[in-house]
Every structure is written in structure tokens, then in C-alpha cells.
Image (cartoon, coloured by chain):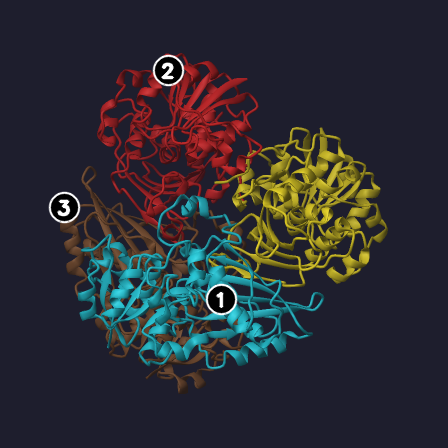
Chain colours: A red, B brown, C cyan, D yellow
Amino acid sequence: MIRAGILGVTGYAGIELLRLLLNHPKVEVTTLVSGSTAGEKISNIYPHLKGICDIVLEELNVEAIAKKCDVVFTSLPHGASDMVIGNLYNAGLKVIDLSGDYRYDDVKVYEQWYKTTHKNPELLKQSVYGLCELYRDQIKSARLIGNPGCYTTTSILGAVPLLKGGYVSTENIIVDAKSGVTGAGRGIHLDYHFSECTENMKAYKIATHRHTSEIEQEYSKLAGKEVLISFTPHLVPMKRGIYSTIYMNLTGDYTDEELLEVYRKFYEGCPFIRIYDAGKIPESNHVAGSNYVDIGLTVDKRLKRVVVVSALDNLCKGAAGQAVQNLNLLFGLPETTGLLNPGFYL
Amino acid sequence: MIRAGILGVTGYAGIELLRLLLNHPKVEVTTLVSGSTAGEKISNIYPHLKGICDIVLEELNVEAIAKKCDVVFTSLPHGASDMVIGNLYNAGLKVIDLSGDYRYDDVKVYEQWYKTTHKNPELLKQSVYGLCELYRDQIKSARLIGNPGCYTTTSILGAVPLLKGGYVSTENIIVDAKSGVTGAGRGIHLDYHFSECTENMKAYKIATHRHTSEIEQEYSKLAGKEVLISFTPHLVPMKRGIYSTIYMNLTGDYTDEELLEVYRKFYEGCPFIRIYDAGKIPESNHVAGSNYVDIGLTVDKRLKRVVVVSALDNLCKGAAGQAVQNLNLLFGLPETTGLLNPGFYL
Amino acid sequence: MIRAGILGVTGYAGIELLRLLLNHPKVEVTTLVSGSTAGEKISNIYPHLKGICDIVLEELNVEAIAKKCDVVFTSLPHGASDMVIGNLYNAGLKVIDLSGDYRYDDVKVYEQWYKTTHKNPELLKQSVYGLCELYRDQIKSARLIGNPGCYTTTSILGAVPLLKGGYVSTENIIVDAKSGVTGAGRGIHLDYHFSECTENMKAYKIATHRHTSEIEQEYSKLAGKEVLISFTPHLVPMKRGIYSTIYMNLTGDYTDEELLEVYRKFYEGCPFIRIYDAGKIPESNHVAGSNYVDIGLTVDKRLKRVVVVSALDNLCKGAAGQAVQNLNLLFGLPETTGLLNPGFYL
Amino acid sequence: MIRAGILGVTGYAGIELLRLLLNHPKVEVTTLVSGSTAGEKISNIYPHLKGICDIVLEELNVEAIAKKCDVVFTSLPHGASDMVIGNLYNAGLKVIDLSGDYRYDDVKVYEQWYKTTHKNPELLKQSVYGLCELYRDQIKSARLIGNPGCYTTTSILGAVPLLKGGYVSTENIIVDAKSGVTGAGRGIHLDYHFSECTENMKAYKIATHRHTSEIEQEYSKLAGKEVLISFTPHLVPMKRGIYSTIYMNLTGDYTDEELLEVYRKFYEGCPFIRIYDAGKIPESNHVAGSNYVDIGLTVDKRLKRVVVVSALDNLCKGAAGQAVQNLNLLFGLPETTGLLNPGFYL
């Protein structure tokens, strides 16, 4: 059994990770760390776990973790885990970091968008961007994974087959994305108060959201030239889901079916990518609770433009599920191990 | 007192119209028509009206209506009201039609997007497009109003100041719109079943939604040249609200403040348009239950693009409220009469 | 015009009060007080009010208020307004207090359930319990009103006709009540975080909720003997609404119709009480946004028991609407002035 | 592997059953029957299953089923499965019926509450009531299971320890129950339309709901005398969950802790029953998506009454999960096989 620990388990990504790992046939969760609630049972904080997982939360202690774990998931705010991760890494552990700290090829891009100084740029060079569908082989031999963000995963996977194949222009790409409220995390704030949030929606951080840079990094790499995009996140009144509507101008007269075939080929061997038939459009509850990314598209012939819809669950494929998928690759397991549940739907 | 009737009052737009007219100081509702439930009290069908409005629903009878009404609102599916409206019009009544039938300058555009033959193209020529902020003067002297749709009102008002002023290119305009579920009406369908709809969102009718043609008609008129757009409607799990995120490429280096000033000038004297300060973004519950349209914007300097957000209540300014605003103009009342309530928010 | 002020306007009851007063034809709002946000426009905090009400919030200053107001609504936590109210009262103002401080006949009951010492027991004796349907005449000549709570209003009005008439036993009365989340106020707390609250429900404060004592006070008074009840509040995932299901054992073999007639007679002349026909059951959205209380009942012959359902809007008839109804009585206006809007429903 | 079939799989209980069986290590789903959509893939109707389960739906054919299945779940409206079940049973299959048809000891009670004639009273005598916590041993040796309803499971399990032990009176028992909307099934109706259902709640079928008789049957059996109860179902705006608040008069002066100990002892060896510590109250999202029943209680000393709260997921422990638990017992597997996932919470 692979022995796993979670740092920051009481956050929403952390608790989703625990849900998935408890169902994973090859993983044993040995260590749950939470600075603020150390000493309590996790099931006191999340009572749905009573009788299923009653592990006592611990203070952070790298030495202790190194003895009890083969892999550690760090689910902490960006910056917070910088030093910790170095220590865990140096202690010989495999580390999957869910923050933005280890996702960038160029530390300057990180520093510019996160408006901070990276504390461990050397280690950043050792990390692999954990988007399994693009970097499967590199992940297999890595020890430190920068697990991609939720908006980024849906936006990248929804567009790169066309960018890489040159089917679309690199100009005038618009990503209009919508997120469920768990994406804002468990921190309390009036904006996420039920009475303010239900029956309400809004755009936020227009043209300034950090995930923009992560998307652009991958779009550029796959397109083979610099790509800049408009990315607009919106908050919608539901718990789970990222839904990206992506607008790209076509470089030729392609049909729905031709473009769908590009996606099918690109994602051959990718068990979590589901390409919809022409005329079908994904919905967010098709992926809620599961690790799938559902992609559909419509060509607008009048405008020579394609509209791609890409949906995933922000807590699962957008965070914890992707992290488990990375774990599977890191440890040579089939990529789908522990991740083939059908999701919630209802 | 102006004597008013509503055809199709049991639909969601119809019942919102009734809500507004009951609070209108210059209107008396004399006639409620509903084919399917004639003979019943409206308060049996909508029990929240018990004791407030217990009018008995009538069968359609143009002669009877002509005697009891000065103005009639027709809130029926498109096509359904074609002949009725002709008869009401010929009987000397003022008519405000909430369907798509009387919104078009060119009957061919209507017929192409609605895939039907217009039954009264002559009458169409008499009608005025009831978007008060653009056609206030024409409305005042009209007798037949084609009341604009919900998606169209938010999309048109959100963009035309920049189109008219030449601040943006007419190419590459994207309107990504989100609607609450009341926009789908009261007809029952599995798609709008609570258990399917809550905690779920989806795009639909990509590149084919009828409102596209209505938006393009007005964009083109204001820009002075043909404008074609990508318009993508989405359904989000809340009752009320249309939220349009509009992407347009700038023709020059404008700041947020410069563009906001263009909006403020364009909408001078328009009591229901609220332009947000730079850095502020509208939310859908700022307009829920009221007749306001809230508009904010952000310039993305990196891309020389502006992202405009335009929000309104689909049942109110997007249907019934706008219809009442039209009534006010038709009868020479102040435009805001009966429409200055603060909305719901909570 | 009656000049009114609101203390604590930024809370949910306060902002609902403002919504109602802005629509009131005989009231002018002159003063909005908020300690924490004095100096800001109310429309900065609640942007739906932009252009409708842009009054600047003030610090508390009793002298200034006394000059600008004829009546003041105090919407503050219990205890907080004790001294303030004394000063306002002594300055000659009429005061309608929305907290629990001035609702009790017996200061000891208050002190026992609120676990505090009442700071102004003399003034408490001057106050009248503002449940208009029961104390209309006393209210008319009062200067200080203790405005009843939301749970209490629905529970009291739903049961007292049968208690007073002796149709039910005073033993074994159960009030099982459900509240929307605005009832918890605008204070942020993890329990009211959208992601914790949506798709979730729970009971709380079983057998210990303060409103129990307020209900018992009125039940006892109307029954003419001490009545003790089980009262269980629940939180359900919606914004507005109190829904009380009340179980009482019958003292005789009564039919639905006989008991409904008791209610109709008891509430004769009460414009906001709607008694449902036999076989009809209120729903919470029948009263959302309005000042109505909807009451229905079913006799269970097998058990010689009646189940009464009583619904209202916690922010409106359960707080702000009732306060406006009290204002109308205090100033000799028709009880329904400014309160006859049809509510939200959608 | 146990070969299983589901009749009526496209309903909500049916699709939840499929979700659970797909995760069950000892079950292979071989047959999905749906009269109305035979010939289609289940994943066309429920797209979240695409790639996970693409079984083609079949017409009902008892012979074919008998060859491909060891056990069949019938998830059809009551009455609909009467004859089918007889045929499946006679073909030698084990049958777990999710309707009300095979839950009663006395056919007359069924016929009275369901207002119909039972078509197979002889077979009813062979059936066992599938409430595992009460009838574990009988279930193990049965071939036909009447799987209990959702309201009934929560209400029965929440009260029988006290009834059996004589801790409470059999008079004046009140069960006030609240259900999520999936409990109303997938059939479309205006009442369950999103726009009517969200932000709304209501009681329904007061004193006449069929589950009353099923609860009374078990209460009476455990108490050793006839028990009649008030049972009031409510609909609340969330997808999953049954939440029963049960009021019972105590026969002595018991503390919270004493009564909780009665529950702990009664449910010893019942892996899905979680008894809360004194002072803790279950919430519906503690059990959403899992097979657990969470029970808490508060003694009201003033009234010598206990208020018990019992929560479960209507689709899981209230239908499909319980059915799988029955399957485990029928086939000699550990009761928890395939059912130990942590639920959804978020």
C-alpha cells in the first residue's frame, strides 16, 4: 500500500482528496495535517466521515511525515507551502502540490501574476506540471508535481488540440469560465454567504485572474508561439463545477465532425476525456463528483469560429482527482485506479 | 386611469406584468385572458395573489377587450398572437407584444431565424421596437410595440454606446450570456425539473439562438454597418437574471474611465441605466426584481480589448418591466411611473 | 410626511425595512445609522439601491435623530439597543424595536431565556408587544413597540384562535418550524457559507430557542392558562420564509371547515391574514416578499388532532413588514399603507 | 460475481442503484430494463455515465432476465411490478422490490392506504420487510424483499429503540419529516419545476401519506401494541435527504446520555447507524450520498419529552443503498460491501 499524507486536509480540496483516497484500493491515508485544528478528529470537523475516517489531525512535522508517508499532498494557499515542500522533498518524499507555486516554467511569470517572490526557484525547476493528458511521461519520473488549477485544466484541455494542430488562430481567443462556489474555498467571507450567493451570479477579476497566466503558458507551448487570451471567471450559485466556453477563430472551413475527430485523436488513450458527439453539449452535472472532462463544440459557419465547451468538477479533476491521477502515474499504477466512480449527477 | 388587459397572464412574463401593474398608480387591470384556465381566479393559479388580485380569467374575446381596455399586453408564444394582435390593433387598442413577432425591421430576418412565415407583415411595418433607451420618441407616437427579448436587451444596451461611437471593431464581438431558469418559462420539461437543474449549468443553442438576429439588427443599425456576432446562451441555477459578458476589440487605447464616460453620456436621461464606477462589476442580484440595467467594464490593455458586463432581470427589464416602461411612454407618463421599487436583492 | 430613521440598516431586517419604507407613500426616510460603516452611502454597501437611495450612513447621535425623525426603527442585536432606546424615547420619538428587548410582559422571562440582565425594566413596562392582529388598539396609543420575532409571529398567529376558543388542549402542543437562511442575519459564519448551507438542512437549538418563551407568553395569555410547548427551529436552504407546522390535540370532533371558520372569525378585519380553504396548504413562496401570513389546516380524525400550517416571510411580516404595520397604527394610517404589494413568488 | 438486473433503471432510485452497483466489488450489472427507452444506451439518457456504463436498455423479458441474472431490483411504481415480480420470483430469481407492494404484514393495510387491490397477496406472505437493522436474519434466508421507503426508514430507525424499551409513551407521537426533491422522482410536474421549487417549501399529504401506515406497522410491532402517529411530509429545496424530527413523551426522567445509550445498545452491530453525542445534531449533508442513518436527540426536561432527529439520504439508505445492503445479506456478503464510501458532503 502507498502511504499518503494530506497537508491542509480541512479545506475543500483537501477533504475531496480524502474522499477519493479512502476509496483508493492501493492507498492508505496515514497522516492528516491541519495547523489550526491539530488534535481533533477529522470527523469532528466533517461529521459525514464519522465511522469512516476518524484520524486525528496533526501539527506539521516533516520528520514524522517522512516516516509515515511515501507521498504527501500539499493543499495550502500559494506561498504557504514553499518551504514545507522543500523540506518534504529533501526528506525523500514524493510531493503533489495543489497550490500555484510549482506550476510555472518561468518563475518570472509566477512572480508577476502572484505579486510575490518565489521562495524556492531552484526546486521549481525540478517540478513537473501535473496535467496528465499533456505530460504523462514526465510525471511518471518526477518527484514534485505542480498540480494544475481548476479553471486552467478545463481551459487548457478544451483548446489545445486545435491550437496544436493549427486549426485555430492564436488571436482573439476568449475563455469565458463559470465556477461553482466551492472554488472559492472554505474561508468565510460575506461574498460567499448563502444569502448573498444563492440566486446570484457575477464576473470577477476580469483580465487579472492568476489562472490566465497558467492557461497562456500551455496554450503558447502547444501552439508553438506566444498566445494571450481574455479570461473571465464567473461565480454561479452551485457547489461544484467549472464550465469554460471557449471562442476561437478557425483557420479553415472545418465541420463539427472534423474538429471533434481532432479531439478524439489528440486524447486517444486519455481515459478521463470524453468528447461529445456533434450536436451534444456538456452540462456541469455530467462531471460533478467524477474525474472526467467533458468537451463538446459547435462550429459557427457564419463567423468561421468554433465555440468549445469544456466542463469538469473543480474539486475533482480540477484539484483532488487530478492529484490522485498524478499519484497513480507517480507510482506506476493504472491512471484510473480509484477514480472510475460515476460521479453524483443527482 | 389607464385600463389594461393581459393576454397569457399565467406565464411567467404575464404574472410579472401583473405584479408591476398592480403597483402602478395610473393603471387599472381590467382584463386577464388565459385560454387554458378561463373561468378560474388568477389567485387560484398563483396563490400569492389571494386577496390582492382575484380577477377571474377570461377567454379571448377581442370585442369585449376593446370595450374594457385602452392597452393590451400580449404575452404569448411567437406566432400565436399574430392574428389576435391584428384584431386588437384594428379595434383601436394600443398593443404591447412580448413575443418576437413585432421586433424586426426586415420580415425576412424574422422568418429565417424563427423558421416560419410571418402572418401579418403589413402590421409589422407599423410596429416600433420597444427598446426605450434607443427609440423613446418613436415609441411615444406608436400604437404597436414589439417589446424586446431579455437576452437582447442586456446585450444591446451593453454594447451600442461603443459601437455607435466607433470605439470598438465590429469584428470579433462575442456575447457570452447567462440566464436564470424563469427565462425558460412555465412550460414543464425534464430539463427544467428541479432535480436536473439545481447544481447544474449548461450552454444551449450555440450559434443558433433566435435572439442573435435581434441583437445583430440593433448592433448593425447603431454601428452603421453589418455586424455579426457569436452569441452563446447558458442556463444557470437561479430564478431571475440575465448576465451578458461582452468582448469587443478596441480601436484605440482607451481607459476604463474614458469608456465609462461614453456610456454615461450615451445614457444621459435614461433613468434605468446604471453605469458602474471603474473597478466595480455588476452582480445579477443587484437588478433582480427591478427594471434597472447595470453595466460595468474592464479594459484589458494587454489585448486592447474591453470586457463589458451587462445585467438585468429577465422577467422585469427583460420582459414585463420594459413593457410597462413602454406603456408609460405610450400614454405620456413619466418613464419611471410604477417602476422605481428597489428590487429584491434578498 | 412621517420622517423615519433606521438604526442598524445594513442588517437584513434593516435593509428590508428600507425597501418597504421607500415604497411607503406617507414616509420619508431621513436618517440611516450604521456604526460600522458611517460615512458611506447605503448604495455602496447594497448596490441594488444605486440611484434609488443614496443616503449617507451616520454615526448614532440621538439629538440629531430627534430633530430629523418622528419615528425610529432599531434593528440591532438584543441588549445593544437598551440604552439607545431609552434616550430616543426620552427625546420624544416613537420607537419600534426589532430586537427581543421589549417583547416581554415579565422581565424575568426575558432574563431567563436571554441569559442577561435587562438594562431598562421600567421602560419595558411602557412598551407594547407589536403583534398587530392581537394588540391593535394598544399599539395605536403606544410610543414604544417591541416588534415580535419571525418564528413567534407565525407560531402565535397559527394557533391562538384555537387556543382562545378552547378547541384544543394546552398539553402536547408541538411547533416544528423551518426558516430560510436570511433569518440568521448578515453576520458571516461557516454555518451560513453557501457551500455548507445549500443542499443541506438541520435542526438547531432544540428545546432552547429564545422564541419559545415569546410563543409561550402569548399562547398562555390567549388560552387563559400556562402553556408550555416543544418548539424546534430548522434551517432550510432558501433565503426567505418561516414555515411552522403546529400539532394540537382537539377537545372535540371538529371538521376542517369548522376550525377554519374559527380562524376566519378570529381574524376578521385583519388584512394580512389569509385563511386557506379546506384541502389547501400554504407554501413559503406564497408569502415571500409580502406581509401576509397564510394559514391552512388538516384535521386528523384518527388521532383527534389538528395539524396547522402557518407561513410568512421572516424579513417582512416576521420583521420589517410588521414594523411598518406598527408604524401605520402608531400614526393613524390605514394598516395596509405601503404593504399591499403582491410579493415575489418568482 | 453476482449478476444483477435493474427494472426501471431510468428513475432516480434506479440510477442511484446503478451508481452503487458499479462500485460494488462482487456484483456485475448484466441487465438494465426500461420500457420507455429500450434500445438506447443508458449513457445517452444519463450522460454522466458515458464511458463508465454504456449498457443498452432492454424491454422486459422475464425469461431473458432469468438467464442473465441472479438477482433483480424492481424500481417501478407500486402496482406496476405486481405481476412481473411473481414471474421473476417463479423463475427462481431473488427479487428486491423498491415499491410499496411487498412491505406489509397485512394486505388490508396496504389496500386501504394505497386504495387498490393487491394482485398477489400469496406472494406478499413470502416477502420479508427489508429493513436490515430490524430483520437481518429473516432477510438472509428470503428470496423476495420489500425494500422500505425513505420516510419510513428514517422514522422507524429514529424511534424504535425507545418504543421497544418502553422509554416513551405510544400516545402523542409526532413525526415531522422533510424530504429533498429527488424523493418526488423523475416524473415531470409543475410542482417540481425549478422555478416553482427553488426558494420554496411546503407540507403535503398531511395525515394521509402512505408511509404513515408503514411506520405505524413497525412502531406497533416493536412497541408490542398498536401505535398511531401524526406524520407530516414536507418538500424542501434540495436534491437529497430525509430529515425526520420525532417528538415522543417520556415515561420517566431520562437524560440525553441515558437515551443515547439505549440507541447505541439497540444498534450494536449495525454498521450504518451513527448515534450522535449529546448536544450534537445531524444535518442532511452528513449523510448525502452515503448509506448512513444519523441520529441525535435532545430531552426537553420542562416537558418530559424527547426530540429525536434522524437523517438519511432518500435515494441511498432510503432506497438504493438499502437495496444493496439487502443484496449483501441475501448473498452472504458482509453487510457493508460496496457501501462504505464517505458520501458527498460538498
Image quadrant for the C terminus of chain C?
bottom left
- Rendering coords of residue B119 (x, y %): 42, 71
- Disc 2 marks which residue? A89
At 40% from the left and 22% from the top, the residue drawn is A96
Residue A53 appears in which quarter of the rendering? top right
In front of the other: label 3 or label 1? 1
Which residue is at the front of the view, B340 or D109? Answer: D109
Q: What is the chain identity of the residue bearing mark 3?
A: B
- Disc 3 marks which residue? B254
Give the CA separation, mark 2 to mark 1.
Answer: 66 Å
Q: Is residue B333 above or below residue D57?
A: below
Q: What is the chain identity of the residue bearing mark 2?
A: A
Label 1: state its secondary structure. Answer: helix
Q: Are marks 3 and 1 in contact (CB under 8 Å)?
A: no
Q: Are marks 2 and 1 on the same chain?
A: no
- Disc 1 marks which residue? C217
Q: Amino acid at mark 1?
A: Gln
Q: What is the chain identity of the residue bearing mark 1?
A: C
Q: Amino acid at mark 3?
A: Tyr
